[in-house]
Amino acid sequence: MNTNTICAISTPAGVGGIAVIRVSGSKAFEICDKILAHLNPPTRGKNLLSTQAANTVKRYNVTSPLVEGLGEALIDEVLVSVFHSPHSFTGENIVEIACHGSIFIQQEILKLLIANGCSLASAGEFTQRAFLNGKMDLSQAEAVADLIASTSASAHRIAVSQMRGNFSNELNNLRTQLLDFVSLIELELDFSEEDVTFADRAKLENLAREIEQKISRLENSFSLGNALKNGIPVAIVGQTNVGKSTLLNLLLNEDKAIVSDIHGTTRDTIEDTVNIAGVTFRFIDTAGIRQTADTIENLGIERTFKAIENAAIILWLIDCSEDFDKISQQISETKIKDYQQKIILVFNKIDKKSSAEVEKIAELFKNFDTEKIFISAKIGTNTEILTDLLLQKSQIPELQANDVVVSNIRHYEALQKAHNAIKRVIAGLTRNLSGDLLSQDIRETMHHLGEITGEISTDEVLGNIFSKFCIGK
C-alpha cells in the first residue's frame, strides 16, 4: 500500500458554496500545520492540529508565501476538522479543510499541500486505505460507491444495509460454519489409517443444504437488486410513428428523442432513467417494428427485440388514431401471448378520436388479458395513471433496514460459483465421497464467499474495483 500522505478535493468539481479537501496519512497534521495559521492573532506554530482534539472543528487561515521577504498572502479562512488514527474513515490521521467553493481557492490549497509533501490521491484511494487498514471489508467498501451513486430510496437502502455489514455478516457466518466442518474432515485425513470419524456426515449434509438455500436466496435476489440499482428496464415498443419517442420525452420531461412524422426515424435504442415515487425506471425507446429493406433500420429492429427480451416491463404502443382494422392488426402483431406478463398495452393518440370512438375501442379489446391504458403522449392525457400502473407492474417489495439484497455483478458471479461448489458438496455426501474430495469442494465454496468480502483478493481485483470510485472518496 502507498504510505504517502494523500490529498484530494472530496466535493464535486465546480463552483459551490463550500468545498472540502481531504488529507490522510501519517504526516497529515504535520503538512497541514505548514499552511494553516491561527486566527486572532494570525500566528503560525508547530503541532497546531496534532494538539487539536479529535472529531472537532476549528477556524484557521490558509496562507501562501509571497516573494521571499515580503510575508504571506491570505488564501482563505477555512474550517478544519481533525480525525485521529485509528478512529477515522481510513484508519489514518485525517484532516478535512472546508474552504469557500472557488475553483481558484481549491486549487491553491491543493498546490500548497502538494508542495509541502502530499501526493494527489488516486480514484478511490481513501476508501481503499480504509479497506486495507481493516476499517471495512471489500463489500462494504463497494457499498460506499453505491451509496454515493444511489438515485432512489430503494438503492439507498440496499447500499446502507451493505455498508453496515449485513451482507458481510451473513457471508462470514456461512464461512465460519463451513470452516468448522472442513477442519474436522481434514483432521480425519491425519488419522486415515485408524479409520477415525470426527465429522458427522448427516449433520454436514443438513448444513450444506441449509447453506445452499441461503446462497441460492442471495443469488436470486440479484435480479431485484440490479433493477433497484440501475433502474427497472422498461421497453417502449410498437410500429413506426405510434408515438414511442413522444412518450419517452414525456416520461423524462425532456426532448431526449427526435420526434418526426417520417417513418423509421428511430434506428437505435435510446435510454434514460427517471425516478417515480422512489423507484428508478430505465426507459428504452426502440426502433419501430415494420417490414423494411433498409439494412440499418433492420439492425435497429433487431435491437428492439433484444430490448423486449431483457425488459421487466413492456409498454407496447398502439396508434388508436387509425381505423379499427389497422388497430386490430397492430394488436395482432404485438405477440401478447409471448410477453403477456410484462406487457402494458398503451393506446396512444386518443386526442385524435372522439370519446365515443375511444369507448368503442376499449369495448372491442376489453377481453385482452393484459393491462390496458388510453393516453395522449402529445398532450399528456392519463400519464399519471400510466406511472401508477408502472409502479404496480414493477412489484418492488418494501425493503427493511436489515434486508440483504445483492446488487453488485461481482458479488453475483462469486455467489454463482459458490452455489455450484456447495452443490458438489451435497452431491459428494450423497455418493459418500472421500473426505479429501469433500474438503476441496467445501474450501472452494469458502474461497468464492471470501472473494466477496475481500478475504480472498488480488491487486488486480482491488485496482479494478477502486478505480471506479470518484477521486476524493
Image (cartoon, helix red, strand yellow):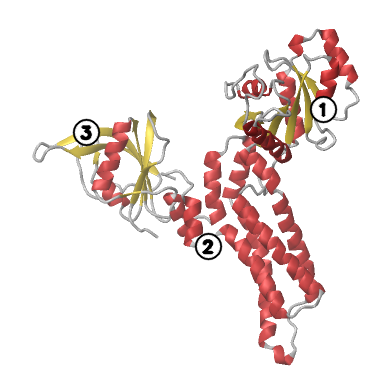
Determine the residue positioned at 10% across, 36% down: 70
Q: Residue at x 52, y 46 (%)?
A: 144
Task: Check disc 1: other Cα within 10 Å, few if <14, some if 14-19, many if 20+.
Answer: some
The quadrant holding residue 85 is: bottom left
Q: Could you tell whether 42 is left or right of 174 in the image?
A: left
Foreground of the two, 6 or 71: 6
Question: x, y (%) of residue 413?
Answer: 64, 56
Residue 340, label in figure: none
Residue 148 versus residue 234: which sits nearer the camera? 234
- Left or right of 70, for residue 349: right
Mark toward the viewer: 1 or 3 = 1
Q: Which residue is mark 1?
A: 371
Residue 222 or residue 159, whichever sits in front: 222
Question: Between marks 2 and 3, how big is the CA–CA gap?
Answer: 46 Å
Q: Which residue is mark 3?
A: 74
- Locate residue 15: give its quadrant: top left
Q: Earlier in the sequence, mark 1 or mark 2?
A: 1
Q: Secondary structure at mark 2?
A: loop
Kind of residue at badge 3: Leu
Residue at 49%, 47% in the rendered image: 468
Measured from the top left, where is residue 37 in percent x and y?
Answer: 23, 40
Judge the density around disc 3: few (<14), some (14-19), many (≥20) Cα neighbours within 10 Å.
few
Left or right: 287 in relation to 428: left
